[in-house]
Amino acid sequence: MPESIVQLPADGTGKSLRTRQRVIGAATVQEQYVLVGSEAVVSFIGRAQTFRTPGRAGTTGQTLASIYNATGSTVLVRVNRITVDLAMTAAKPVTVLPPVIRVQRVAVLPTNGTALPKTSADTALISSASVVCLQDASADGASSITALVDTIPAGQMLSQEFAPRLITAAGYEPADRLTFFQGEPDIILRPTEGIVVELVYVLATQNPITDMWLVGFVWDEYQVP
């Protein structure tokens, strides 16, 4: 069978699906693989890393950081990876669960917090002003004056994981950075769509102010003719 190319449903990535047959020994194997077309023109390749963000010892959770593609944006945002790290100076009883780190898609721009600088992987490229990044820290170890707030819709959870936990002060703490979406399909943010990284908990002891969080986003922005 000759190779055939089928255009995938429009998702803003300019991808097509190619099918071919190969003869391996006595067997004929059909293969499928994705081609990324040149239709998608990347205009920015970015990274954003939060300050060292203290926990908020409340009972309603905490939004650590967000990335949002605003209304009227002329670009699509392709989120490749999100990282979360935690350092603790106070042990937690084994009976106290750690917070859940939850990654959610949102449809409303989060409010308050502090601007999160966008760093270009290629200094010749400039990020769209429509792509807004926020964090819940105003400096290393200092919470934003007003907490970052988001509106979480139902049924839009993308991933989640329990945070690491220090149960005793003995032993060695290995690197415990959590990585979301690496090696998985990218998350596409169209205009009026965003992602927030939030902590879900109901007890103040689950996320004391001595807990220090780091969040990072890796993404690119592109336009499709």
Image (cartoon, rainbow, N blue to C red):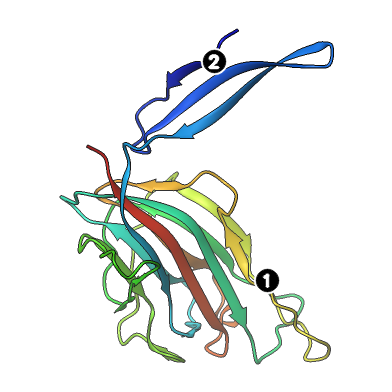
Residue 75 in view in this figure: yes
Task: Count neighbours of disc 1 (C-alpha within 10 A) and say few if under 14, some if 14 to 19, many if 20 or more.
Answer: some
Residue 66 horizontal side relative to residue 71, left or right: right
Helix, strand or loop under label 1: loop
Q: Earlier in the sequence, mark 2 or mark 1?
A: 2
Q: Which mark is residue 88?
A: none
* In the depicted structure, whether residue 194 falls above or below residue 116: above
Residue 93 appears left or right of 206: right
Count neighbours of disc 2 (C-alpha within 10 A) and say few if under 14, some if 14 to 19, many if 20 or more: few
Residue type at numbered disc 1: Leu
Q: Are marks 2 and 1 in contact (CB under 8 Å)?
A: no
Q: How many marks?
A: 2
Alpha-carbon distance for marks 2 and 1? 54 Å
Which residue is rendered at x = 48% and y = 85% of the image? Answer: 52
Q: Position of residue 113 (x, y in %)?
A: 31, 77
Indicate the quadrant containing the C terminus: top left, top right, bottom left or bottom right: top left
The residue where tag 2 is placed is: 3
Rendered residue at 58%/54% (across/down): 182
Query: Would you name the residue on which mark 1 appears?
Result: 97
**Is 112 placed above or below 74 here?**
below
Q: Nearer the viewer, residue 104 or 69?
A: 69
To which quarter of the image does residue 170 belong?
bottom right
Q: Identify residue type, mark 2.
A: Glu
Q: Residue most toward the top?
A: 1
